[in-house]
Image: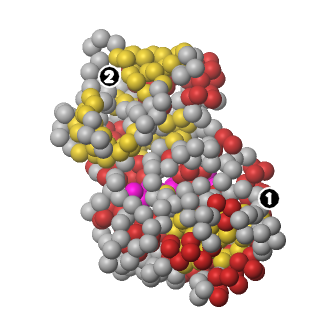
Amino acid sequence: MGVKTGRIIISGNDSRAGKSLLCLGLALALKRRGLTVSCLVTKPSIAEAQVYNRVTQRFARVLDPKMLNLHQLLLVLHQVSSGSNLVLIDGSGNFEPSSIDDFKLDTDSGVSIWSKTSVVLVIDVSKLQDDLIKVVQKALGGHELPAQLVLNHVGDKPFSEELSVKQADEILTRAGLPNSLGGIPDNYDLGEYVGSEAGFKPILLSHSFLVELERLIESSLDIDLLIKLAEQSNELPDTSYRFAPLGRRCRIGIAQDSCFGMCIQDNLDLLRFFGAELVPFSPLADTELPERLSGIYITGGNLVDYGPELSANRELLASIRNFAESGGVVYSEGSGTAYLCEDYVLKRDEVHGGAGVLPGIAEEREPNQSYYTQVSEGSILIGAGGELMKGISARDWKFVPNPGISCSTKIVFEDSEELAEGFQPLLNTFCTFGFLHFGSRPEVARQFVDVCEARVF
């Protein structure tokens, strides 16, 4: 049978209109009301997903058609809907006019049409080049699913400093357009914590800011109307999963603290689905790994801000190295792989000591994010030879290996550039500077847990 859970996709007339912090504020406000909320991102916004996970205490999944096929995308929607009262989808901010007969899944309107999900469109009135009516008509004209607006910077130019939500709604009503759910006053900025294309940095989002954001959203918007809008989303069509969940059979440590935790969270959910008990540990604060671990997953982290503290924790670095050398299963990605190198060099020429699991030096460089396909050229920790996996890479690390260290996989970027990447310095170890999406090939997660189970103490 199909799944009926309220859903909203939050988009904007501009990529910095404030949609992500609106999504975060709504998650906080809805959770305060006792609702179970799940969040999705429609692009590999790992930093945003990390924050959503911390706020909702549920995995924030990645709904990205460049890494998942249509069946896999539908599975993600089913999985996040399970046990949720409402699903919030943080869109890309690209809401091109679309119709049910002509839509693209790389646009928010296309995701809305494909998934039959209601829309909240954030309009930043301070950045409008045309009048409000033209902007809304261009975005929502012909869109066949329920939609509402949120106005950001109400009262700011170019209209007039006295413009209120009521006045804006009167303008919309006269044009036969939907009224807004409310407006954010011009002395607040829903985009101020979004410092780059990578999204907001979790370290900047203090508890006091989150409390203020929740109060702002609750006092400025009609939350009850938004819930009703979400409930107008159509029931998801039925789909089947060719794998069955497995009982707990091993313990995998997950690097997770104020520095680490950046990953495609679908991966963690799949590891748990296939029988792993996930045990968080802190490379910053812990002096040794948790007991009875069969494997560890070193997620991406913020080495720029925490390099000195991480290298000073020699006890934990030694614990990780001893675990790997004694046959423990180790998977690392992104800057987590740099952390496992003998040394890593930041752009400001700071050199910090790593765990020494991967012999060589990682050198930070300017990021150049790209999707890629990873091909295993032989049997590796997470699969057999020839298997294809999808992922995303910031391409922000250059690895200089020690003699004798070779690659076990090849990756092909969107621009067709090929790169030998993916290292297996020890039998049960796989290190990559990219971020694989296990959902693109769930066998990867099952294989990881299988190998860990073989090492249960």
Picture quadrant where residue 407 is located: top left
* Highlighted range, magenta: 54-64
- Residue placed most toward the observer, 238 or 335: 335
Return the x and y of residue 160 as percentages of the image width and height.
77, 69
Q: Dot 1: few (<14), some (14–19), or many (≥20) neighbours within 10 Å?
A: few
Quarter placement of the N terminus: bottom left
Q: Secondary structure at mark 2?
A: loop
Q: CA distance from mark 2 to mark 1?
A: 54 Å
At x 56%, y 64%, the residue is 13
State the mark number for residue 383.
none
Of callouts 2 and 1, the N-terminal one: 1
From the top left corner, tell me how far across and down residue 151 is, in percent: 67, 69
> As rendered, which of 249 and 216 lies closer to the eye?
216
Amino acid found under the numbered disc labelled 2? Pro
Instruction: Identify the residue position indicated by label 2 in the image.
Output: 425
Residue in view at x 29 percent, y 60 percent? 69
SS at badge 1: loop
On the image, the x and y values in percent for residue 256 come to: 56, 39
Q: Looking at the image, which is closer to me, 331 or 377?
A: 377
Q: Residues within 10 Å of mark 2 (few under 14, many from 20)?
A: some
Q: Nearer the viewer, mark 2 or mark 1?
A: 1
Q: Position of residue 347 (x, y in %)?
A: 53, 22
Residue labelled with disc 1: 187
Question: Please, is residue 199 above or below residue 307 in the view?
Answer: below
- Residue 241 shows up from this direction: no
